[in-house]
Image (cartoon, helix red, strand yellow):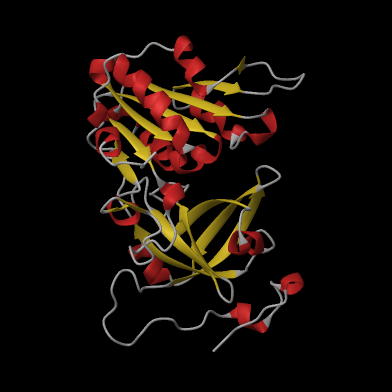
Amino acid sequence: MTYRIPEDNINTQPFMEKLPDFNRPTELMRTDKVYEAVITNIVQLTEMVKLFHVQITDPVEAKLFSFLPGQFVMVELPGFGEVPISISSSTSRKGHVGLCIRKAGKVTHMLHKAQLNTKIGLRGPFGTHFPMKKMIGHNVLLIAGGLGLAPLRAPIFWINEHRSEYKDVTILYGTKTPKDILFDYQFEMWSKIYDNDIHLIVEKPDKNWKHKTGMITDLFKEVTIDPVNTYAIVCGPPVMFKFVCSHLNKIGVPMDRMFVDLERRMHCGMGKCCRCMVGSTFTCEDGPVMDFWTVMNLKEAI
């Protein structure tokens, strides 16, 4: 059966008032379970990026749903398809999922037209996660480029909610222009309340820009890194991983203490379409979070 929704009226169609029952009566695999959810808030972050606050509607399912920093969900817009999106919110808010979505394809284009109370489906969570418990008692360096701050937001929430368990926390964030910066309204809170050391940089500044100009690697001149006691998390365009992680390795940070997010290779999220395959490795099943040693041993991973 095919469902068609006019593009100019996505939020008012009767079909959107209730999700179809995709669940089969037999025992479900984790990959099959669809959580019915509703969009409760939408924040326009940039011209092309929106943050969607989504709530799982069933109270019991909301309590059961849990994820770890770095994992992703398959977001389904009935009638149009589904896309893999990293979770960009705190693990402590049961049933609440933050989704930072860039308008890029058919599904994300239609999601950007969605309004409050639009019904969507969530499957997951899927994938590996950042080993936050291994980092306890160490310094944590979080490095993001562009939209990479979205998946980095979950580990930032985790660290801030367990701040006494971690030592120095440093956030390095770079974008092309000041207009591309995400979540700038939270920087002061992260810095003053949670004692995070934040450094910003853009490639093309405007006349009001007061921070550094250049590439993300130029920010290494602004910070002191203790390689023996530091874990690093790197999110952003894959081309950035090689330069950032190579620099960290050069100053002595072990490759198995650097973690990158390969979410941009995702498609189906279940290892069925093979689009995320690197050699014999399925990024969606063995990733998206991997240590840099593993990534460097996967040909064409970055």
Count of numbered marks = 0
Residue 63: x and y, percent?
36, 63
184 left or right of 113?
left
Residue depicted at x 41% and y 24%: 244
Image quadrant in which you'd find residue 42: bottom right
280 left or right of 89?
left
Q: Nearer the viewer, residue 18 or 160?
A: 18
Residue 162, compared with residue 198, is above or below; it is below
Residue 302: x and y, percent?
39, 38
Residue 91: x and y, percent?
38, 49
Residue depicted at x 55% and y 27%: 174
Residue depicted at x 51% and y 52%: 98
Residue 138, compared with residue 96, is above or below; it is above
Q: Nearer the viewer, residue 4 or 75?
A: 4
Image quadrant in which you'd find residue 32: bottom left
Quadrant containing the N terminus is bottom right
